[in-house]
Amino acid sequence: MKKYIVSLSLLVLACQHGVLAQEIKDSLPSNQQLENVVITVDKSPFLKSKTSESLRLNQAIENVPQNIQVISNELIEARQITTLTDGVVRNVSGAVRLEEWGDVYARINMRGARASAFRNGMNVSSTYGPMAEDMSFVDHIEFVKGPAGFMMSNGEPSGIYNVVTKKPTMQTRQKVELSYGSYDYMRASADVEGKLVQASDKVFFRINLMGSSKNGYRDFQFNKRIVFAPSFLFKLSDKTTLTTEYIYQRLKLSDFGADYLFSKEGFATLPRKRTFGDPGFEPSVMNDHSFNANLKTELADNWTLNAQLGYFKFTQEGQYMWVTHIDDKGDFVRTSNLWDADNTATVGQVFVNGEVETGTIKHRILGGVDVGHKRYLVDWSHKFDYDDIGTFNIYNNEYQKPIHGYPQVDRSKPLAQRVAQYGIGQADVGQSYTGIYVQDELAFFEEKLLVTVAGRYTTVKENGNRERREDSKFTPRFGVSYKLGYHTNLYGLYDQTFVPQSGMKRDGSSVTPLTGHNIEFGFKNNFFNKRLQSTVSLYSITKNNHLSADPLNAPGENYVLQLGQTRTQGVEVDIQGKLARGLNLNVNYAYTDSEVTKATKGAEKGSKVSGFAKHVANAWIDYIIEEGVLQNLSFMGGITFMGDRQTWAFGGGGGDPLPDYTRVDVGASWKKDDLKISLLVNNLFDRYLYNGAYYNSRGGFYYWRPEDPINLKLSLSYSF
């Protein structure tokens, strides 16, 4: 009731303001004019009102009939986020990150399933990948909840996240930053941009560089990463620009299988500092290359064309430790598993945005075509036992050297030649697709009512060394958004999805495409002259042929299950913006429930789907002193809670349930002119936290990946 009273009071005040203004205007002589008054709205620096061009919508977020959240660059810098795996998801309702492979891959789940990864509007998702983006070259990140038919690139019904990279802004500026922290953490980055030729306004450049090194809180852990990311903007004419960019990431890290702990007793039954690693284990080396060229031109008034070409190549060479034996006494046999991979993708896109009017109806038109080809080569075939039963024990605190030494892997043959042998643990997975998309957003009653009618036709060919098939499907999209006064937009959405899938079933049968649909209703509010924004959404997603890891997988096996039909339902609340002078907040909550609704082999009706938490809540507050002796001194703090968590793979419910998760982080910073000093404390109360947990019913053991204990990071940045 109080909410309605407050809303009514604001409405009355607005009406009174309008009446008073009209009375003043009418009382003035006709030859007198009121002076123009410019009102500056003190908005939160963390808010973005519109998505990037790579999302193609050409519309304010509040008018889009879907839950879309944007993590701005200002927020990334303020929260001292350095990689996509580091604190991004807590700013979005219901988004959780599974720690399956730590800092290597950014596997993010929303609405009960894995979210598809996009970069600059191009689908870069793969079986394993992409490599988690370092924030040194990231401008902002867009989260789209539910099917994103307008993206045209076969997105998951759970949603997508789109990483938008930094590009030239046609300004001249430089920034350097140094960081030092716990576990010998060191990081240096630079961001430099300007004119390529000072006398010309036709070519601009931007270069982002980064290098970091970190050891772990456990023995034999390390992580080294470098980034080189140049980009160029060419003004070909007043109406045409060409932007090109190249991004290179190199990551070298210790055996990431050894980041896990194993026990038959239950989750978190070993000290988190216990290690299963060894200084002789081969490290993994990943190289991630991407090239992107974007041509944008104005065709006519209110009509633009974007053409984009992207090439992505990710290579991995290394091994990971896993388990082949564990018993009640704690005797454990560590096994080395080869993991060499080559992941490539070529993507082309052309789309147009425009506006036309038919009578009193305004049409925003979006149309486009995208094509792509992906190929994933992987060799898991080589295995080597480090230990015999009785030579390594999980309860022994002392260093235990592998009794059999270390494996010698024969890499004399190229990966493609090795994979062509079609051996066990080797795969060549290829996929080609073509998509055509057309959307008409009709605006009625001076754009108070927006109706979206759209459709996409997708054809996909699977051409790996284990299966070949072709599938096509038309998927419609219908949406409506109604502006209820100045502050509120009501919306509804129906969208379908079609996602070709790849994987190996245990019985050798083919994996069929995922199909599904999303029904969503919600409302978006803005308060205090758009300084504070909120989104509330209710949704129901039905998916057919949902994939999950087979719970019977032995070490090195990567078989999958198809779960028949699943249904995910939930409620999401996102609130962000400026609450008062100097006080910014981000609060979100999500309730998610996901279960199997049609049984299939290995998945019973009513079983919970993996990879979600029923309750996820986040709160983060930033406060900056805006004047006085302590001007520009700021404090921040946040809490993350996850309750009723499911394991990361289907079938993990045979053991103990995962406990609730609560983490608190705090920080402070001070800025003087172009100099800024920041301090961040993660896991303030030093709780034993973990994700990526699972119960292996075949072996009767648990495994989990502990997060870092309490740790500090001190950063110094200078802009000039």
Image (tube, rainbow, N blue to C red):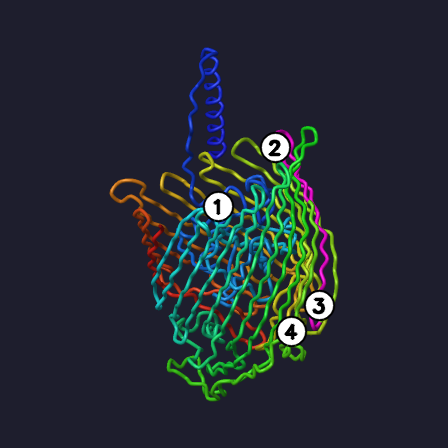
Q: Are marks 4 and 2 in contact (CB under 8 Å)?
A: no
Type of secondary structure dominating the magenta stretch:
strand
Q: CA distance from mark 1 to mark 3?
A: 47 Å
Residue depicted at 64% across the width and 34% down the height: 443
Q: Which mark is residue 427?
A: 4
Question: What amino acid type should be assigned to the residue bearing mark 2?
Answer: Glu
Q: Which mark is residue 15?
A: none
Q: Earlier in the sequence, mark 1 or mark 3?
A: 1
570 or 209, which is in the foreground?
209
Question: What amino acid type should be assigned to the residue bearing mark 4?
Answer: Ala
Extreme residue toward the front, this view: 199
Q: Is residue 427 magenta?
A: no
Q: Nearer the viewer, mark 1 or mark 4?
A: 1
Q: Is residue 490 above or below residue 143?
A: above
Residue at disc 2, secondary structure:
loop
Question: What amino acid type should be assigned to the residue bearing mark 3?
Answer: Asn
Q: CA distance from mark 4 to mark 2?
A: 52 Å
Left or right, residue 695 beside residue 682: right
Residue at disc 4, secondary structure:
strand
Residue at image mark 1: 201
Q: CA distance from mark 4 to mark 3?
A: 11 Å
Residue at image mark 3: 463
**Image x and y of residue 222, in percent:** 41, 72
Q: Earlier in the sequence, mark 1 or mark 2?
A: 1
Left or right, residue 689 beside residue 536: left
Question: What amino acid type should be assigned to the residue bearing mark 1?
Answer: Asp
Q: Nearer the viewer, mark 1 or mark 2?
A: 1
**Image x and y of residue 28, in percent:** 45, 12
Residue at image mark 2: 447
Residue at disc 1, secondary structure:
loop
Residue depicted at 48% across the width and 50% down the height: 204
